Image (cartoon, rainbow, N blue to C red):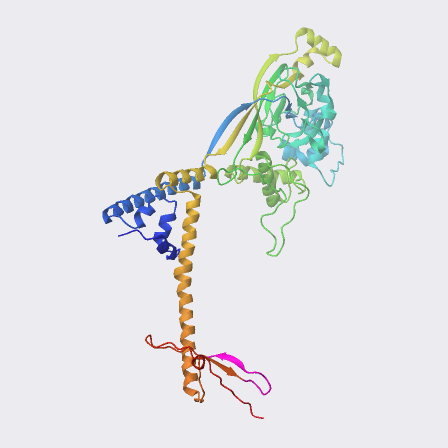
Amino acid sequence: MKRPSGLEEAQSPASDIRVFASSCSMHGLGHVFGPGGPMARRGLWTTAVLLALATLLYQVAGRVRYYGEFHHETALEERESRRLTFPAVTLCNINPLRRSRLTPNDLHWAGPALLGLEPTEHAAYLRALGQPPAPPGFMPSPTFDVARLYARAGHALEDMLLACRYRGWLCGPENFTTVFTRMGQCYTFNSGAEGAELLTTPKGGMGNGLEVLLDVQQDEYLPVWRDTEETPFEVGIRVQIHSQEEPPLIDQLGFGAAPGYQTFVSCQKQQLSFLPPPWGDCSSVSLDPDFEPEPSGPLDPPRPSLGPSPPYSLIGCRLACESRYVARKCGCRMMHMPGGAPVCSPPQYKDCAHPALDAMLQKDACTCPNPCASTRYAKELSMVRMPSRAAARYLARKHNRSEAYIAENVLMLDIFFEALNYETVEQKKAYEMSELLGDIGGQMGLFIGASLLTVLEILDYLCEVFRDRVLGYFWNRKRSQRHSSANLLQEGLGSQRTPVPHLSLGSRAMVRVSPGLPPLPVPSPRRSLPLNAPATSSPSSRWGVCVFTAAP
């Protein structure tokens, strides 16, 4: 078979597979569909192209399947910084209420729920507190607020804080923010509340952090009346070091600092980054504690959230979930829970809030994913006895206390960064879209020698095939139908036409349209002559005149 000439290729339609194979950049097509060569050679090339194409599809399917599994990897890196933001430090006295601030009205309302007292034990408990019994005719108040009880009877920071320094600068109670936790009224240093500027430190080590001298006030501790889950047997301060974006959960995550010791806390910042679905399970949407998942009616719109939502955190999500659950079951919230529901009364604490919260924690009803970005502080604790004998005498004179009181009630807390370097734990996508495209392109180049432009060539060829084979079929069908209709119409008109005598003198005639106008030449139908007819040059054989006269 001879190779077609350039004229034959030019006359071939663009949808011809041989024309496409001769110009396509995909390897092997020219040998399969090109002209010339024995059939065995063409068959071998066809087998090779099909095997390469099958291998390519298998490899591409594996890469796409691996990308669809959304794998991730965790990278641990240590970075340097010239200045670090100091964390928030929350302090709580282990004793929730001061004995000198309790009143008979407090025992009437909060005794059974918060202290485990029966009404018949109030007089004995007041004697244990060193207070006189309730006067005759005592009438309790009509209402009672648990949050106000803890704010009034809790340990005041002004009484506990004996000395405070941050990086050598004096600080005081004004640098702390009051916060309610499950342990009662607590205080947070460097909370950043109400737009306060966060404190930073340019150095690590002792002397470049927070140093506080605290008095735990053991003489204000409540007597241990009976053994309950809420009865504290310890003495000291609970401390939690956390970021400003998350609320404290000091009853579960705090560590203790005991009186008679100086506690050194060396911190290291850890920055955690997790991936959202489908690569991970993190979330950055805060849970609204006032949102009610069960609307009162099918047409009731969802209740909007009041104010900006705080940054999402794991502890904040748990507290909001607990607040929603207790509010739905009891119609109120506990004092440490966020939200706009009213604070539970002491009977609601005892009869509903505590049982509901315990049942919720047992069945683990809250599902809170990890935050996409969070900060954690690793801690190393060490302690030394304090004060020394010389320091005890000095502190006793300075604070007008006895040396025994200083030894049993005073503690020192020193919190600082070990160094300014910090760790980053980051989840990363194990397989990016760019890597998938690169693998597919490499497999295409290896097996069939193709690229993205080759894919465009194939798409362009398919468009040509669709235009020539599919659309062309319908166009030819419509054209043939139109020609058939026209022929039928001409045949019908020819059968009804009456013959008119005329004089044909040549290939052109003159027609007079109306009197007074010159005649117009009209071409006559072409006349076929035999090939052997002699040509004539007579004017009468070339031209004729036909005159039509209109009736007056």
Q: Which image quadrant: the C terminus?
A: bottom right
| Residue 62, image quadrant | top left
The magenta span reads 512-524
Of 525 and 113, which appears nearest the observer? 525
Q: Is 522 inside the magenta-drawn segment? A: yes
Q: Position of residue 481 (x, y in %)?
A: 41, 73
Q: Main secondary structure of the magenta part?
A: loop
Q: Position of residue 197 (x, y in %)?
A: 71, 28
Q: Position of residue 195 (x, y in %)?
A: 71, 32
Q: Is residue 102 visible?
A: no
Q: Is residue 270 visible?
A: yes
The vertical placement of 441 against 80, above or below, is below
Of 520 and 152, which appears nearest the observer? 520
- Who's the residue at 76% across and 32% down the image? 135
- Residue farthest to the top? 390
The vertical placement of 429 against 488, above or below, is above
| Residue 257, image quadrant | top right
- Who's the residue at 69% across and 11% down the image? 403
The vertical placement of 102 against 7, above or below, is above
Is residue 226 rendered to the left or right of residue 497? right
| Residue 463, image quadrant | bottom left
The vertical placement of 17 against 451, above or below, is below
- Residue farthest to the front? 538
Q: Position of residue 440 (x, y in %)?
A: 41, 40
- Who's the residue at 61% across and 55% down the image? 297
